[in-house]
Amino acid sequence: MPEAFLKYHQKSEIFGRYILELKIWEISDFKRYPNNLKYSLFFMDTRSQKKVLFDNHHPKGHHYHINDNEFIYNFFDEDNLIDDFKLVIFNQFGVKL
């Protein structure tokens, strides 16, 4: 059974309107998670229900969602993941994290 360690977790409400939740796990299942990371980065506007989600669940691998649209994500490392997530949030919502 693969082991998973929650490496990072942040959940917050921003401006009384947005929900942000970031989770990054270190995971020992190298076959399913070649970077030894599993992540779920979520941001939602509670008024419009518009949302962004970056994740890498098996078998899809690295990808992100903007509402109902899904896109391939070229993962490099954790720092770039967070930066790319923040950039998409700014571009979609005008919110700087």
Image: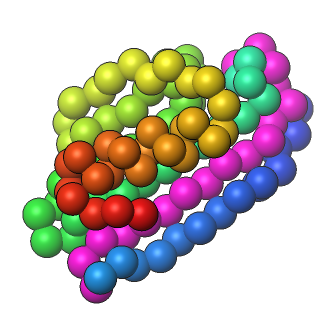
Query: Residue at 76% across / 55% down in the picture?
Result: 6
Relative horizontal placement of residue 40, taking residue 79 as reference (left or right):
left
Residue most extreme to the bottom: 16
Q: Is residue 39 above or below residue 18?
A: above
Above or below 29: residue 8: below
Whether residue 68 appears in magenta in the rendering, the answer is no
Q: Is residue 85 left or right of residue 45?
A: right
Q: Please check the rendered image and state whether residue 24 is part of the magenta-colored stretch, yes or no.
A: yes
Protein image colouring: rainbow
95 lies left or right of 20? left
Relative placement, left or right, of 59 versus 18 is right
Q: Please identify the quarter of the rendering in which residue 3 is found.
A: top right
* Residue 8 image position (x, y, % from top left): 71, 58
Which residue is rendered at x = 45% and y = 39% of the image?
84
- Residue lying at the far left of the rendered structure: 48
Q: On the image, which quarter does residue 10 sit in?
A: bottom right
Give the camera-side residue of 76 and 7.
76
Please give the name of the residue rendered at 22% of the width and 30% of the height, measured from the top-left corner.
69
Position in image of residue 63 (x %, y %) = 44, 26
In this rendering, is residue 75 above or below 11? above
Where's residue 43, x and y in %? 36, 58
Q: How many marks?
A: 0
The outermost residue toward the top is: 31
Q: Which of 70 and 15 lies nearest the eye of the viewer?
A: 15
**On the image, which quarter does residue 15 sit in?**
bottom left
Q: Write the start and end of the magenta stretch as one range.
A: 16-32
User: Which residue is pictured at 23% across the width and 46% down the height?
Assistant: 91
Q: Position of residue 19 (x, y in %)?
A: 36, 69
